[in-house]
């Protein structure tokens, strides 16, 4: 009826021809239909746009390991020696809180930071049936703090794209140069991106590269449920550089049966052996008088201190030793006539070697007191950490799985002792076996610190392989 009436109206219009009347009739009939179709198309388009947008933004956040590293290194987390509290610096909480939020964004519901600045989180396993109970919980650990040796304030990371060889001059201080002679591993990274600072600070890849790699592998597991895994326990620790961080580590609450620190250097490096480490403080007491009236009365503590330092054998110094050779390293001190203090690191892979170093210090102390009458010298020695190999040898498969994970990532595994220590040293000692896996850190504690995108990506793949191997070996 509507269409018929519309047609009659058109024929009654004052138009010039029958054809025009037909055209107007059709137009009047079709216009509402066309408008209706356009409205429906707009509705459908809006509907699909909403669905598409939801699908995009509901997907787990996906970032590269490089994205994460560049963000983390800009946060100053330098620790402080001789602090009496944990963490030694409150600014470490800035990175800790960010990591908690990022873990929650990835679906780690129990992510948290405690009052000591330890970040913990758990990715539940996705195994079913009997397999779920057979695969032990595995921990991945990296530390947030950076070394007090070089500034960590206002880090400006530089990406050297598509490195093609040759020395790298750092733009912020052109006297800082990464040379091939001192950094032969650069030649293993032709064609990838090299990451440095501008030469005015350290980079902080030790150990923010390890943090970025752990976060990236967690992201991979969350985004791809087809990768089968057991429970993954995650921890980021403060004050590793001071050797005191894990004193407050809650191993029981962490929940892992075995763990790995991601804090090694060269790609493929696996460490199941560290130093036996002690710290020593020499305190030389003298007597101060006005230098114009000092004859027969002044006893200058600095001379006795200098004597002690000069009698450390040349073959027991960091600059003359390598591989498994131990050393005594005076690294800090205060000089004064009345009291001079010197701090030293004692390091040896054998406990017997460490004991020999301590005995040597006391012998030199006695000689100095005889040579410089009137001085008294205290030598105080405290334990730092012990070689984790003694306990890791009892569970060799923990290290073996890491070696196998490297091979599957196309990396030649290098089982070598680390001339240093990790959080894993102390964790192993207190009952959580914890070898160390490479993170791709180079020239740590230095303005010449660097890493490469390729090495970090290899570390991520190694961690993923490791997680899968634990499932394979325990089914």
Image: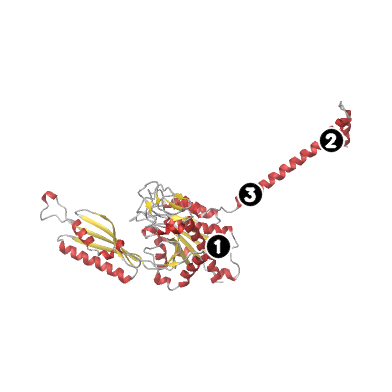
Structural distance between the alpha carbons of marks 3 and 2: 42 Å
Q: Position of residue 250 (x, y in %)?
A: 44, 62
Q: Nearer the viewer, residue 31 or 140?
A: 31
Secondary structure of residue under mark 2: helix
- Asked if disc 1 and disc 3 are in contact, CB closer than 8 Å, the reply is no
Residue at point 60% right, 67% down?
128
Residue 261: quarter of image: bottom left
Residue at point 33% right, 70% down?
351
Residue 378: quarter of image: bottom left
Q: Position of residue 118 (x, y in %)?
A: 44, 57
Which residue of the protein is positioned furthest toward the bottom in this rendering? 394
Q: Residues within 10 Å of mark 1 (few under 14, many from 20)?
A: some
Pointer 1: what residue? Answer: 124
Q: Residues within 10 Å of mark 2 (few under 14, many from 20)?
A: some
Left or right? Give the position of 380 relative to 110.
left
Q: In the figure, 180 relative to 394: above or below?
A: above
Structural distance between the alpha carbons of marks 1 and 2: 66 Å
Structural distance between the alpha carbons of marks 1 and 3: 26 Å
Please indicate, yes or no, whether residue 407 appears anywhere in the rendered image: yes
Marking on residue 279: none
- In the rendered view of the protein, which quadrant contains the C terminus? bottom right
Please indicate, yes or no, whether residue 119 appears anywhere in the rendered image: no
Q: Nearer the viewer, residue 107 or 361?
A: 361
Q: Nearer the viewer, mark 3 or mark 2?
A: 2
Marking on residue 26: 2
Q: Nearer the viewer, mark 1 or mark 3?
A: 3
Q: Nearer the viewer, residue 119 or 342?
A: 342
Instruction: Give whichever of discs 1 and 3 has the lower sequence position.
Output: 3
Secondary structure of residue under mark 1: loop
């Amino acid at each position: 009826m509507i269409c018929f009436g519309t047609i009659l109206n058109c024929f009654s219009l004052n138009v010039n021809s029958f054809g025009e009347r037909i055209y107007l009739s059709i137009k009047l009939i079709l216009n509402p239909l066309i408008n209706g179709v356009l409205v429906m198309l707009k509705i459908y388009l809006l509907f699909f746009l909403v669905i598409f947008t939801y699908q995009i933004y509901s997907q787990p956040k996906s970032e590269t390991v490089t994205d994460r590293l560049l963000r983390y290194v800009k946060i100053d987390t330098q620790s402080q020696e001789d602090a009496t509290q944990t963490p030694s610096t409150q600014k470490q909480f800035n990175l800790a809180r960010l990591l908690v939020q990022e873990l929650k964004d990835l679906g780690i519901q129990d992510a948290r930071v405690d009052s000591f600045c330890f970040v913990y989180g758990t990715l539940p396993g996705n195994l079913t049936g009997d397999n779920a109970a057979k695969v032990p919980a595995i921990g991945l650990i990296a530390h947030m703090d950076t070394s007090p040796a070089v500034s960590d304030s206002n880090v400006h990371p530089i990406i050297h794209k598509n490195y093609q060889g040759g020395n790298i001059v750092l733009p912020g201080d052109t006297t800082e140069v990464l040379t091939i002679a001192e950094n032969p591993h650069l030649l293993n990274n032709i064609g990838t991106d090299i990451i440095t600072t501008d030469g005015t600070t350290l980079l902080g890849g030790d150990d923010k590269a390890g943090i970025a790699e752990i976060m990236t592998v967690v992201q991979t597991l969350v985004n791809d449920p087809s990768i089968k895994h057991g429970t993954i326990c995650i921890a980021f620790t403060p004050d590793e550089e001071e050797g005191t961080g894990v004193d407050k580590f809650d191993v029981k609450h962490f929940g892992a049966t075995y763990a790995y620190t991601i804090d090694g250097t060269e790609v493929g490096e696996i460490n199941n052996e560290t130093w036996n480490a002690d710290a020593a403080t020499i305190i030389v007491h003298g007597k101060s008088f006005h230098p114009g009236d000092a004859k027969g009365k002044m006893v200058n503590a600095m001379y006795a201190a200098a004597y002690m330092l000069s009698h450390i054998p040349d073959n027991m110094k960091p600059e003359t030793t390598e591989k498994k050779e131990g050393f005594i390293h005076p690294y800090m001190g205060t000089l004064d006539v009345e009291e001079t203090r010197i701090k030293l690191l004692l390091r040896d892979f054998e406990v017997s070697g460490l004991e020999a170093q301590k005995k040597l210090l006391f012998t030199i102390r006695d000689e100095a007191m005889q040579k410089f009458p009137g001085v008294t010298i205290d030598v105080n020695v405290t334990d730092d950490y012990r070689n984790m190999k003694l306990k890791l040898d009892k569970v060799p498969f923990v290290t073996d799985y890491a070696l196998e994970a490297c091979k599957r990532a196309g990396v030649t595994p290098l089982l070598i002792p680390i001339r240093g220590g990790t959080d894993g040293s102390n964790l192993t000692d207190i009952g959580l076996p914890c070898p160390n896996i490479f993170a791709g850190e180079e020239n740590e504690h230095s303005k010449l610190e660097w890493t490469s995108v390729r090495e970090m990506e290899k570390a991520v793949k190694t961690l993923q392989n490791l997680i899968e191997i634990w499932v394979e070996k325990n089914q």
